Every structure is written in structure tokens, then in C-alpha cells.
Image (cartoon, rainbow, N blue to C red):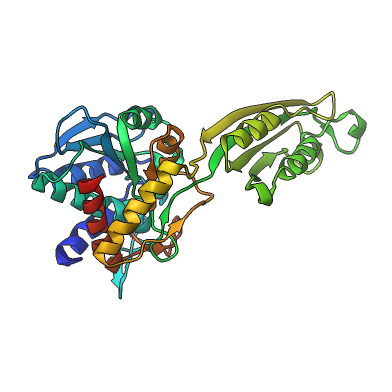
Amino acid sequence: MSANGDTLEHLSTWLRTESPTHAPAGVNRMMDLVAAEVADAPVAVERIAGRAGLGDVLVLRAGPQTSEPAVLVMSHLDTVHPLGTADHHLPVRLEGDRLYGPGCYDMKGGAYLALEAFKTVARSGGARRPLVYLMTPDEEIGSPTTRAMIEDLARNAAFALVTEPARDGGKVVTGRKGVGRFEVHVEGRPAHSGSRHADGRSAIREAARQILAIEAMTDYGRGVTTTVGMISGGTAANVIPQHCRFAVDLRVVNAADGERHGAEILGLKAHDPDVKLTVTGGMNRPPYEKSAGVAKLYERARSLAEELGFELGEVPLTGGGSDGNFTAALGVPTLDGLGIDGDGAHTLHEYGLVSSIEPRRKLMVRLLETL
Ligand SMILES: [Zn+2]
């Protein structure tokens, strides 16, 4: 199969089937399309009903049904693009080698090519290990309803392959930072800013001091970053604000830094004794460190790609988390970025490169056959 009309037609249908995380009907239509895609192949399909207002989960199984640890493939079918994006801002279209559309790069293109590979190997019976393919509905919001399932499957897996987008001209990902998320609520004391200024305790003033301290935890040398990316507070220009809330994003390279800075943020104390500070949250995704097992898996993939006639580079550390963080943190050698090449993830100029589909599909076939 080349990246022919059939591939383009099916993938375009996937892109038109909009599936933002919080639109479970759309996500479930994607799950229907995946199930239809494997209906005529020797693939067992398990569908698990969605929870917490999110979409369903699919677990596809193929290959030898032994108790050997499996090869686990993971894709998410949710996107960040709201409903209507394909009608207005990011219509599905082919321009040269670029296939534009919501989620083409992150990550329907990758899910599509890996599913084709999975089907091929299921049919040929060429796998050495059981093959498990997990399709999830909630990666873009941190996988709240699927993390436990991912970790359960990982405990019985020898390797994990993730179809997040390829980087910088086709590179795979062998390490990702850990991600922490925190919410800070500051409660002060309201007062009239003219007549009662001295009585007030400004929540925003306290928040400002806290934010500077949090941002100062950033240490590029150690790969630690902190970002206060959202803030709200106050009710009017002439009122000393009672409330202020802000969100903190923490990224770390190793688990120790996650614990240390997580504890620091959770332990923040108000400077003003009359102001109350409440911090909630914690590490959302553990770091995906490039272990010896990950390095070895990458080497195997690199030599398989070489046999197929292309060079497979690697990005040994990226700031963005994925479900690969969960499997890698459990010690399962994990290779990520096996999806489609392209650019513009999470933007309105998102596209996948059609020419990258076939070589990467073949690489996935070889991985499923030989791992
Ligand atoms: Zn993604």
C-alpha cells in the first residue's frame, strides 16, 4: 500500500470527524471508524464505555495469544480543536504533500498509519509477541480516565510504542519532561480602595509575590521550568481584591526534581498573615527518562529504518508530555514520536506530510514483527 487515494480518503474522513476531548460523541465516532477499519482483520476489539463525560476507549488485540509480555501501541483520538474548526479555520485539504486538518499531525495521521500496520501484522501472523493497541479519548487533557488502564497494560508489556507526531523532519522521541499542574487560590480581605484602603488585604498583591517566587524556580540548566499561564482575580478597579486564582505548570527532567519542586509549590506560605493561600495539584505526568532500555529500543528502530532505506533521528528530550510518560515511568522501554511527520500541532496551520506515512507505516510493521 502506498500513500494512495485510499489512505487519503480514509484519513481525510478521520480528520472531518471532529473529536475534541470534551465532545464525546465525536470521539466515539472516531472509535467507530477505528473499529470499522479492523472489522475484516483477525483483531479482537474491546470497547470500554467512557467515563466522566469523555469518550470511549478501544483495546485492540492481535498476534499470538500467549502470556508473553506484549508490544503495546498507544494513540489518542481526541484533539484540541473545537467543533467547527474543519468547517471554518482549518478545512481538510491537500496542498502538495501537506494534508491539512484538525488533528492530522497530533495525532490522527500517526494513529492511522499505525492501525494500518497493526492490521497488516495481524493478517500476516508475523508477530512474535501479543500485540495490544490502545486508543484513548483524553490524552489532550492529561488522560484522567485512562491513566490507570495505560499503567495496567504497561505492566504486562515488554515495549510501548506511541504515535505522537514525529519531530524536526521525522525524528522519534526518546525522552519527555514530567509535567506538574497546580492551582493556587489566594484569599485576602476586600475593602473600598478609596475610603478603606488600609483595611484591605489584596489577594492580587499576594499572588504577584508568589508568582515571582514560582517563576524563579525555572532553571534551564537543570531542565526545570515553571509557568504561571493563567490568572484571574478582583471584581472592580476600586475594590481591594478578595480573590485571586492562578495555574502553575511545572516541567522537570527527572522524578527527584518533580518531587522537590512539587513539594515547594504545595508548601508555599502567604507573606501576609491575613491572607489565605490554598495550593492544590501535583505531578500529572512523571518524567519519561531515556533509560538504557529506551536507548536500546531506539537503536533497534533505527536499524530497522535503515533497512527500509531511511534515517531515523531522535529527539532525546522534549518538554511536552504524552501517555508515553506513564509507560516509561513504569520501566517499560518506550519509543514515542512514531506518528506522522508535519508541523503546527495545536494550531490552525496543522498539517501532516503525506509522504511520511508509508515509510513510517513500514517501520511500525517491522517493529510489531520483530520486537
Ligand atoms: Zn498528541
Estimate the x, y position of residue 6 in percent, counting from the top left: 15, 62
Total number of numbered discs in the rendering: 0
Residue 125, given in percent of the width and then of the height, sits at 10, 44
Q: Which residue is depicted at the point 18% across and 40% down?
A: 128
Q: Residue at x 57, y 35 (%)?
A: 255
Up/down of 156 relative to 291, above or below: above
| Horizontal and vertical percent position of residue 191 | 83, 31
Q: Is residue 246 left or right of residue 349?
A: right
Q: Looking at the image, is 272 positioned above or below residue 81?
A: above
* Closer to the camera in the image, 83 or 56: 56
Quarter in which the N terminus is drawn: bottom left
- Residue ranking furthest to the bottom: 96
Q: Is residue 213 left or right of residue 32?
A: right
Q: Residue at x 26, y 49 (%)?
A: 367
Residue 232 in view here? yes
Q: Quadrant of residue 32?
A: top left
